[in-house]
Image (spheres, rainbow, N blue to C red):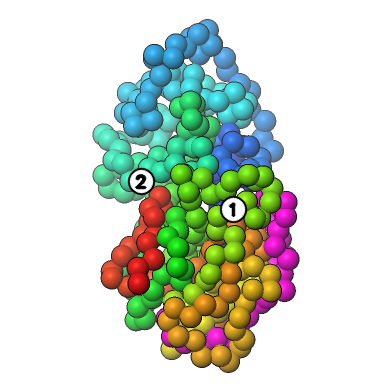
């Protein structure tokens, strides 16, 4: 894969794999799971409709928490009846049943991994006891299924258990929500790429929403303009400060995937803080920074679908060719997708 292609695939897209409409392993209702959704699969799928599906009663709905059990019991027609109309256009009942039957073979149960609400949707992730298979589903406020992904999971135990020598503090003052973060691809879509395996994408939520008002405006997003801090003392080795913030929100800059950013050398471990607001960076190359020092404001520049912070630590200055390092956070916290990352003093 070319370096430019890797950048496009891994940077800043909060909708991540759920923005895909791939049959067999990934199913999604493109257009309903966030501020920015696109159909990236040109395959056309015939929709299967049955009388049972059309006449499904409200009281017969399968609750979100019971979805894995329903799949294991082979209740695919009932589940399919809860697909949103736009989701049904992308997959037939026959294909869904075949995919689910093959995927759940050999599994007795799926255990809850994370569950969260964001922008009107309810997300659930379950994993098998051996953590080699996972299910991610997005429900709307009416408990219609608007996105579903099944995934064979891989792990990298050697690097998963090895952390940075530097202890890092949260690079923000306000609590942020972990949209991507963790050690499997359902928790963190960066995980499959060695150069960004332990990266985080962080937004701010209020009442389970990341914005209020016009969703096309950057200023509507709670994260836009938040102060961003140096996570530990070090020396600034790279700065970008002139990239225009994306607007309308959802339009992304693929030519400058990281957008405005600061890279800090912490003695051979390099932190990167990306998608900053244009003109907000207050440091320059060569500056010595202290832990907690403000270095800029959070923005929506680069390959970013809404205002959020991309944070990672790597073993080299060029973070696209270096290896991502598992972050040793202060107080031993290990934030994962769906959790609030609290900024402690």
- Packing grade of label 2 (10 A; few <14, some 14-19, many >=20) is some
- Up the image or down, 261 lies above or below 64; here it is below
Vertical side of 11 occupied by 56: above or below:
above
Residue at the (64%, 67%) spot, across then down: 277
**Image point (44%, 23%), residue name:** 79
Q: Quadrant of residue 8?
A: bottom right
Image: magenta residue range: 232-257
Q: Nearer the viewer, residue 133 or 79?
A: 79
At x 48% / y 22%, what residue is drawn? 82
Q: Nearer the viewer, residue 295 or 339?
A: 295
Q: Secondary structure at mark 1?
A: loop
Pick whichever, 190 or 180, lies toward us.
180
In this image, 140 relative to 341: left or right?
A: right
- In percent of width and height, residue 298 lies at 58, 66
Residue beneath disc 2: 114
Decide whether residue 233 is among the magenta residues: yes
| Residues at discs 2 and 1 in contact (Cβ within 8 Å) | no
State the residue position of label 1: 221
Q: Is residue 270 visible?
A: no
């Amino acid at each position: 894969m070319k370096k430019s292609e890797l950048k496009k695939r891994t940077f800043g897209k909060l909708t991540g794999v759920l923005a895909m409409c791939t049959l067999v392993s990934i199913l999604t209702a493109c257009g309903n799971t966030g501020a920015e959704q696109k159909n990236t699969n040109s395959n056309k799928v015939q929709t299967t409709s049955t009388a049972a599906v059309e006449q499904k009663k409200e009281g017969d709905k399968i609750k979100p928490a019971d979805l894995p059990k329903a799949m294991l019991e082979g209740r695919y027609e009932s589940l399919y009846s809860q697909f949103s109309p736009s989701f049904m256009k992308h997959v037939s009942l026959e294909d869904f049943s075949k995919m689910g039957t093959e995927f759940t073979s050999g599994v007795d149960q799926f255990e809850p991994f994370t569950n969260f609400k964001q922008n009107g949707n309810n997300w659930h992730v379950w994993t098998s006891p051996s953590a080699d298979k996972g299910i991610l589903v997005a429900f709307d406020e009416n408990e219609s299924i608007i996105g579903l992904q099944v995934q064979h999971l891989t792990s990298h135990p050697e690097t998963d258990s090895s952390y940075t020598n530097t202890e890092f503090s949260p690079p923000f003052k306000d609590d942020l929500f972990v949209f991507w973060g963790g050690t499997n691809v359902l928790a963190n879509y960066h995980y499959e790429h060695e150069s960004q395996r332990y990266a985080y994408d962080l937004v701010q939520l209020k009442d389970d929403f990341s914005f209020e008002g016009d969703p096309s405006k950057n200023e509507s997003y709670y994260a836009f303009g938040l102060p961003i801090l140096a996570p530990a003392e070090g020396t600034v080795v790279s700065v970008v400060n002139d990239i225009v913030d994306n607007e309308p929100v959802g339009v992304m800059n693929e030519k400058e995937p990281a957008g405005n950013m600061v890279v800090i050398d912490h003695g051979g471990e390099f932190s990167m803080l990306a998608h900053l607001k244009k003109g907000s960076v207050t440091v320059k190359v060569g500056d010595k920074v202290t832990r907690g020092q403000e270095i800029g404001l959070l923005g929506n520049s680069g390959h970013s679908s809404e205002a959020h912070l991309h944070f990672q630590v790597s073993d080299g200055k060029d973070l696209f060719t270096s290896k991502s390092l598992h972050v040793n956070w202060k107080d031993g916290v290990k934030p994962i997708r769906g959790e609030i990352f609290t900024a402690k003093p």
